[in-house]
Image (cartoon, rainbow, N blue to C red):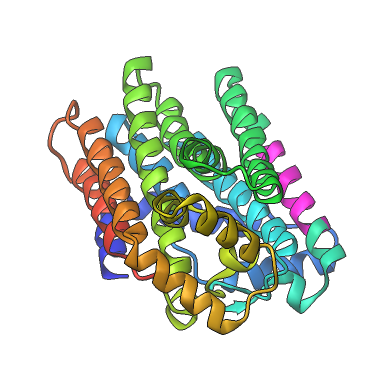
Amino acid sequence: MEDLEKIVAPVAQEFGLFEQQLPLALHSGVELVNKIVAYLLRQESKRLRPLLVLLSARLCGIPNAATINAASLVEILHTATLVHDDVIDESLKRRGMPSVNAVWNNKIAVLLGDFLFSKSLQMMLQLRDFDALDLLAITSELLSAGEILQLEKADNNTMNEEIYYQMIWAKTASLFATSCKIGAMTVGATPETCEALYDYGSHLGMAFQIKDDLFDLVGSEYHLGKPIARDLKSNLITLPLIFTLEQLDAKAAAHLRQTLKQDLSDTEISQIRQLIHDTGGISYAQERMQFHSTRALESLKQFPESDVRSSLQILVQYNESRSR
């Protein structure tokens, strides 16, 4: 976490204001909601999306009340998707702690996710900026569409590399990109500057999701704080596995796809993970992650050197080296 502290340093004051506002923004008249929100806030989160809002704003000007509001709403929007994801994936762990659906139940978790989405919508309106509202509304739609696309392709076994990139752009990278752009918009940055930061966030988000997909195959539950091989068990085909399927002959690929539709034993999971490694799937995904990391760094070249730009650059390196 030492790298994150260094990254936060140029916006430490604003980050403190965000952390003060977040629980206040989530307050409800329903005591159970407040109890669950307090539980969520105790979970260890990297807070990358609000951090991107604050750094992008600082890179372009002086962060203000709208910036802090935007930082809070993107974190709330992201948290809502996580709560719903854990219900869909039947995941009992999140960030090293039992998930909301594990502590309470699926009905409460779904409704809590809905509550969070509603709160983020209220905060979008508080920005009083139609361009920002349009961007956030589109992003909200993309987050859900990306998840649905992934499930659709898992059901009909039609996931390929092109669709994979569309899917991770929608479900992950779009919110990274929007976080950067909305931060710049809150301080009145030019459209060209906003687009450069949108491009940075987009490529960082793509690299981030590829890294997460690699964790599912090479990580450990102890370090990640959530179950591993969850994608394999759910027949969610990610980039390393897509590459492996393309290396196999038609018969072997069809057999593997059929195997993935069944309940996998620990032995089968281990064998599939080894196959992905042996056929170069891990290496290929790492190469693609590096490609997007490089593109993210290139998007920052138009900005003069500063501690803020340095933080955004270090954030790219942090993603590549993170262990969770």
Residue nearer the viewer, 300 or 229: 229
Q: Which sits in the foreground, 219 or 196? A: 219
Nearer to us in this view, 226 or 29: 226
List x then y, in percent, for residue 1. Answer: 32, 70
The percent coordinates of residue 229 (x first, y second) are 54, 71
Judging depth in this view, the residue of 4 and 202 nearest the camera is 202
**In the rendered image, which quarter contains the C terminus?**
bottom left
Which residue is depicted at the point 47% across and 31% down?
A: 182
Q: Which residues are magenta?
A: 111-123
Q: Per the image, is 121 magenta?
A: yes
- Disc tally is 0
Percent of width and height locating residue 174 = 50, 37
Q: Residue at x 70, y 68 (%)?
A: 262
Is 173 inside the magenta-drawn segment?
A: no
For this view, does 99 lie left or right of residue 31?
Answer: left
Q: Residue at x 65, y 60 (%)?
A: 258
Q: Is residue 10 visible?
A: no
In the orientation shown, which residue stands out farthest toward the left? 305
Outermost residue toward the top?
191
Residue 104 visible in the picture: yes
Quadrant in the rendering for residue 236:
bottom right
* Rendering coords of residue 164 (x, y %): 51, 42
In this rendering, would 87 be left or right of 98?
Answer: right
Predominant secondary structure in magenta? helix
Picture quadrant of residue 141? top right
Residue 323, above or below 307: below
Residue ID at (41%, 68%):
275
Report the side of 271 relative to 141 (left or right). left
